[in-house]
Amino acid sequence: MTRSMGYPIRPLAPSDYSLVISVVNAWWGGRNMADMIPKLFFIHFQQTSFAVEHQGELIGFLIGFVSQTFRDEAYIHFVGVHPDFRQHHIGQNLYEAFFQTVKMLGCVRVRCVTSPINKGSIAFHQKMGFVIEPSEKSVDGVCMAENYDGHGGDRVLFCKHF
Ligand SMILES: CC(C)(COP(=O)(O)OP(=O)(O)OC[C@H]1O[C@@H](n2cnc3c(N)ncnc32)[C@H](O)[C@@H]1OP(=O)(O)O)[C@@H](O)C(=O)NCCC(=O)NCCS
């Protein structure tokens, strides 16, 4: 177990599933996110997914995995921090725990995507050293892949090389 600003980081477990899906919509400002985190992530990706606790309460989590197609590449599917605990480098420490783990598994780069409306996520990922993939579509100077996640589902694509 590592520590994030005094908050312990541990592997995410199947027993975290119910709690995570009960808080994510609120943590994402009311957007419906719970359907995007099926239980399989809590079962099959425990080695590369992490939770942060404070006084026994879950206050942050990261779900990621190593690509089966591109063995030297990792992907972060979800990261969330309790609104009362943001800007304390918990997200950063979750990312660093993930980077450390996937480097040991042979990865040389990490990818993730976010919605163009999620300006906080875009700023956070740029702080974490991710660069936005070039794309034909750009809004307010931010490149995004059009319809990446279905019709109307434009996404900002990030990549970070170690
Ligand atoms: C994005 C999120 C995970 C960041 O977590 P966090 O613990 O608050 O972030 P950290 O404190 O580790 O921030 C690391 C750096 O990013 C910056 N940062 C974090 N959130 C930011 C924001 N909303 N706007 C601008 N910068 C931000 C911090 O200032 C810090 O920079 P510094 O090193 O210069 O101090 C958190 O805001 C969150 O859970 N948001 C809702 C869920 C979400 O959008 N997840 C991402 C998409 S899956």
Image (cartoon, grey):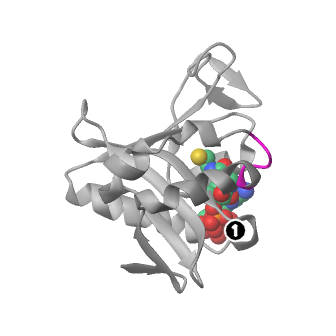
Residue shown at the point (66%, 34%) measured from the top left:
115
| Residue underneath mark 1 | 86
Point out the stretch of residues depicted in magenta.
Answer: 27-31
Q: Is residue 140 magenta?
A: no
Residue 83, image quadrant = bottom right
**Classed neighbour count for the residue bearing mark 1: other residues with Cα under 10 Å, few (<14), some (14–19), many (≥20):** few
**In what quadrant of the picture does the N terminus appear?**
bottom left
Picture coordinates of residue 87 (x, y %)? 69, 70
Q: Amino acid at mark 1?
A: Arg
Q: Main secondary structure of the magenta part?
A: loop
Establish if 158 lies above or below 147: below
Residue shown at the point (51%, 42%) measured from the top left:
131
Picture coordinates of residue 64 (x, y %)? 41, 49
Question: In what quadrant does ligand 1 lie?
Answer: bottom right
**Ligand 1 lies under 8 Å from the Cβ of mark 1:** yes
Residue in front for this viewpoint, 15 or 122: 15
Q: Among all residues in the image, which is located at the extreme top?
A: 151
Residue shown at the point (42%, 46%) measured from the top left:
41
Left or right side of 141 for 128: left
